C-alpha cells in the first residue's frame, strides 16, 4: 500500500469516523481504523460494534501508487495529521507491520493490526427506504435527543424512536419523566406505520455528521440496522458551489425492543392555556434554578390571571421568586416541575412565545411553540 495526498484530503475522512472509535476498548483493534486504498479511492472505517462509519475519499492517478489495506491507531494518526502544516503533503506506505508517514522532514511509524481481524457490522437487507433533507433530519434529532434516557433498565428508552408514516418521519424520545416529539416532512411510498429504535450512540453520531442544507438523504431501515450515506463536500470558494469529494456511509444497529405507546401519555383536554414570552421564561427559570434543591431541582408554579409566579427553595432555607406576565384567564393553579426539564425544552423551542397547556396539579403539562405544531413536549409534574 502506498499513496500521497494533501493533509486536508486525508484529515477530512479521518475526522468523520473518529467520533465512533472507542477510546476505552475491550478489543485493541476497536481503537484502530481500517484503512483501505484502491486505484480510485481511499476509505477509513471505524466501529464500536454498534455504529459503523465508512468515509471514502476520491483519489487521482497522481496520488495512487499501490493498493492495500491495514488497520492503524485512529487517534495517533489523527493527531499527527492535525499537527502538520495546513499546506503539507503526506505520503503513506506500508512496511511489513508498520505504517510509515512522511511529510517534509517529518517521519512517523505506527503499529498496525491485520485488516482481516477488523470487525464489521453484518449486512442487513433494506426493508424500507425514504428520502429526507439533511436539514430536516438534523432538526428532527436536535429537537428531541435531549429527552432520551441516559441509563435505564428499560433499554428501549435509551434510544430514539423513528416512526414512518406517509410522507412523514416522526422522532419520539422519553426517559419516563418527560417526552419529546417532532414531525418532519419526508418522501415515502405509501406504507403502514413503521417503527424502529436507534440507540443513543447512533443518534449522536448521525447528528454530528448532518449539515443544515437541503440536500436529500436516503435512509434505509433494515431488520436490524439503519443506514444512510452522506456526501463529503469540498470547501467552496466565493460564488462557487461545493463539489462532492467523497461519501460517509453511516450504519447503526437498532435496539431490539418495543417502544411504549407514547400516544397514551399525550395530555388530552387541557383547559388551562398559558402564553408566555419564551426568552423571559427561560431566563427566569435559569435564575430560579440556582436556588433549587440540588438533588430534586424542583420549582413551584403559582398561576393566576395574567401572572405566573415561579418559586424555588433549598434545604439551606434560601429562596428565589420570579413574577412573569402571561396571557392566561382561568382558575388559579399550583403545580411543580423539575426545572432542568423545562430549561431543556425551552432550549430547543423557537419563536417569540411559548404555549403551555395544563389541566390540574397532578396532570402532565404540554409545551408547544405558538407558531408551529411540529413539536410537542410533555413534562410530568412533581411533588414538593
Image (tube, helix red, strand yellow):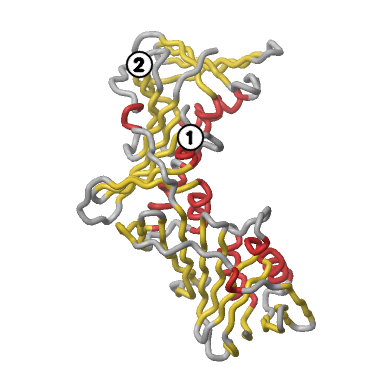
Across and down, in percent, residue 35 comes to 59, 74
Number of the label disc, if any, that sits on residue 154? 1
Q: Residue at x 44, y 56 (%)?
A: 212
Number of the label disc, if any, that sits on residue 41? none
- Helix, strand or loop status at disc 2: loop
Q: Residue at x 27, y 56 (%)?
A: 187
The part of the image, by quadrant, that contains residue 296 is: top right
Q: Residue at x 46, y 29 (%)?
A: 176
CA distance for labels 1 and 2: 29 Å
Across and down, in percent, residue 258 comes to 38, 39
Foreground mark, 1 or 2?
A: 1
Name the quadrant of the C terminus. Answer: top right
Name the quadrant of the N terminus. Answer: bottom right
- Helix, strand or loop status at disc 1: loop
Across and down, in percent, residue 275 comes to 39, 24
User: In the figure, 48 relative to 102: above or below?
Assistant: above
Circles 1 and 2 in contact, beta carbons < 8 Å? no
Q: Mark 1, residues whose alpha carbon is within 10 Å: few (<14), some, or many (≥20)?
A: few
Tell me if I can see residue 8 in this picture.
Answer: no
Across and down, in percent, residue 98 comes to 72, 78
Whichever of callouts 1 and 2 sits on the residue coming sooner in the sequence is 1
The residue pinned by badge 2 equals 359
> For the view shown, which residue lies furthest in the top direction?
332
Tell me if I can see residue 38 in this picture.
Answer: yes
The part of the image, by quadrant, that contains residue 271 is: top left
- Out of 321 and 22, give the one closest to the viewer: 22
User: In the figure, 275 relative to 225: above or below?
Assistant: above
- Out of 34 and 142, give the one closest to the viewer: 34
Q: Mark 2, residues whose alpha carbon is within 10 Å: few (<14), some, or many (≥20)?
A: some
Amino acid at each position: 500500500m502506498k499513496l500521497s495526498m494533501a493533509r486536508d484530503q486525508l484529515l477530512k475522512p479521518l475526522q468523520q469516523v473518529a467520533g465512533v472509535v472507542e477510546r476505552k476498548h475491550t478489543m485493541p483493534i476497536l481503537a484502530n481504523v481500517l484503512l483501505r486504498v484502491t486505484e480510485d479511492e481511499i476509505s477509513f472505517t471505524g466501529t464500536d460494534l454498534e455504529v459503523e462509519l465508512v468515509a471514502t475519499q476520491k483519489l487521482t492517478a497522481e496520488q495512487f501508487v499501490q493498493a492495500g489495506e491495514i488497520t492503524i491507531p485512529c487517534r495517533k494518526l489523527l493527531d499527527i495529521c492535525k499537527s502538520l502544516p495546513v499546506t503539507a503533503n503526506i505520503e503513506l506506505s506500508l512496511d511489513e507491520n508498520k505504517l510509515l508517514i512522511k511529510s517534509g522532514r517529518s517521519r512517523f511509524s505506527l503499529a498496525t493490526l491485520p485488516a482481516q481481524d477488523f470487525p464489521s457490522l453484518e449486512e442487513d437487507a433494506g426493508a424500507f427506504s425514504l428520502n429526507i433533507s439533511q436539514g430536516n433530519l438534523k432538526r428532527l434529532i436536535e429537537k428531541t435527543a435531549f429527552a432520551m434516557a441516559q441509563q435505564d433498565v428499560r433499554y428501549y428508552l435509551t434510544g430514539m424512536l423513528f416512526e414512518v408514516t406517509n410522507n412523514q418521519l416522526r422522532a419520539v424520545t422519553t426517559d419516563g419523566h418527560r417526552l419529546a416529539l417532532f414531525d418532519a416532512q419526508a418522501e415515502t411510498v405509501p406504507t403502514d406505520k413503521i417503527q424502529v429504535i436507534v440507540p443513543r450512540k447512533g443518534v449522536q453520531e448521525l447528528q454530528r455528521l448532518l449539515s443544515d442544507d437541503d440536500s436529500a438523504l436516503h435512509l434505509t431501515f433494515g431488520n436490524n440496522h439503519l443506514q444512510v450515506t452522506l456526501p463529503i463536500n469540498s470547501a467552496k470558494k466565493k460564488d462557487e458551489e461545493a463539489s462532492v469529494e467523497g461519501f460517509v456511509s453511516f450504519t447503526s444497529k437498532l435496539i431490539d425492543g418495543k417502544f411504549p405507546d407514547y400516544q397514551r401519555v399525550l395530555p388530552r383536554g387541557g383547559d388551562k392555556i398559558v402564553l408566555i414570552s419564551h426568552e423571559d421564561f427561560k431566563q427566569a427559570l435559569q435564575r430560579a434554578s440556582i436556588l433549587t434543591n440540588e438533588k430534586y431541582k424542583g420549582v413551584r408554579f403559582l398561576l393566576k390571571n395574567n401572572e405566573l409566579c415561579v418559586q424555588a427553595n433549598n434545604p439551606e432555607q434560601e429562596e428565589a421568586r420570579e413574577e412573569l406576565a402571561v396571557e392566561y384567564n382561568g382558575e388559579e393553579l399550583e403545580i411543580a416541575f423539575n426545572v432542568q426539564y423545562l430549561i431543556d425544552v425551552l432550549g430547543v423551542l423557537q419563536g417569540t412565545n411559548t404555549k403551555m397547556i395544563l389541566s390540574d396539579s397532578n396532570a402532565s403539562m404540554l409545551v408547544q411553540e405558538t407558531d408551529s405544531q411540529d413539536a410537542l413536549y410533555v413534562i410530568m409534574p412533581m411533588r414538593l
